[in-house]
Amino acid sequence: MYLAYTDESGDSGFTNSPTTFFVISCLLVHETQWLRTLDALVELRQALARRHGIPARAELKSEYFIYGRGPIADLNWSRARRMGLFESLLDFEVDLDVTNFAVAMAKDRIVARATNDPREVAWRFISQRIDTFCRKLHPQDRVILLPDEGHGTLVRKVMRKARRFQTIPGHYGGSLDIRARYLVEDPFDKRSSESYFTQLADWNAYAAHRYRDIDPVARAPSDLWDRLGETRLLEVNELTGGPPGIVVWPSAEN
């Protein structure tokens, strides 16, 4: 059994939106590695508490590193130093037994296709890629989805539909039946303040969002996503191409 933790980055709206992309990241950890991974995260947070005075139980959002807020506000660090710490946390993730991917919705191109809600499209891609991950690489396993709190109604709707009816255009023509067969039960919302795994998904979502080929900004390095190295699931876009481990829709070519 895999546990799939997700979080979002960017605004999903169209009017007066500060971002051009809406991104969801997904972090997969197998049940047999879950406790060992949690123990590693607990040790990490205890180390941050000893070295920098960041409370181990405090939520660490990616935006806190960008803007100097939350539990790191009192450190009075420069942005460069805060981002250095953020980069080291992403580097730490490479040594964990986790798998990561992300989907990025290009909102301007979605408008051109008259698609109203990038969230629903993004969650469909999440369900497809999770299901394919199991079907092709781990057919003996199943997945439980654990989205960040606040998205349960929409995600539940998308996932229930995905189990019963879901087709996509085939890369070589025709259509493919890709009903989700490996996602079990309804999604269980996780409060990010109570889950180190969801906080990892938050960090990864920001890293994917501000990647050089997605929506880079001057205030953050554009190679954060690269720091996740081999944890990235390259198969998610092996046919469509694009940034490693990031599904971009619609693509610039379409």
Image (cartoon, helix red, strand yellow):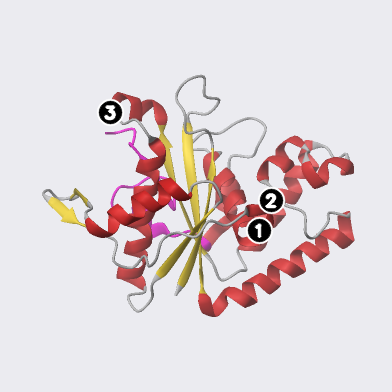
Task: State the residue position of label 2.
Answer: 87
Seen in the picture, residue 193 relative to 213 is either above or below; the reply is below
**Quadrant housing residue 193:** bottom right
Q: How packed is label 2: few (under 14 Cα within 10 Å), some, or many (20 or more)?
A: many
Report whether residue 148 is seen: yes
Task: State the residue position of label 3.
Answer: 113
Disc 3 vs disc 2: Cβ atoms closer than 8 Å? no
65 with respect to 49 (left or right): left
Quadrant placement of the C terminus: top left
The magenta-colored residue range is 231-254
Label 2 vs label 1: CA separation? 6 Å
Instruction: Give the residue displayed 23% in from the left and 53% down from the top.
Output: 166
Q: How packed is label 3: few (under 14 Cα within 10 Å), some, or many (20 or more)?
A: few
Amino acid type of the residue tagged 2 in the rendering: Glu
Residue positioned most to the left: 174
Q: Residue 76 at x, y = what percent?
A: 88, 39
Please name whichever residue, 229 or 141, is drawn nearer the observer in this view of the structure.
141
Label of residue 91 in the image: 1
Q: Residue 27 at x, y = what percent?
A: 52, 60
**Label 2's element?**
helix
Amino acid type of the residue tagged 1 in the rendering: Asp
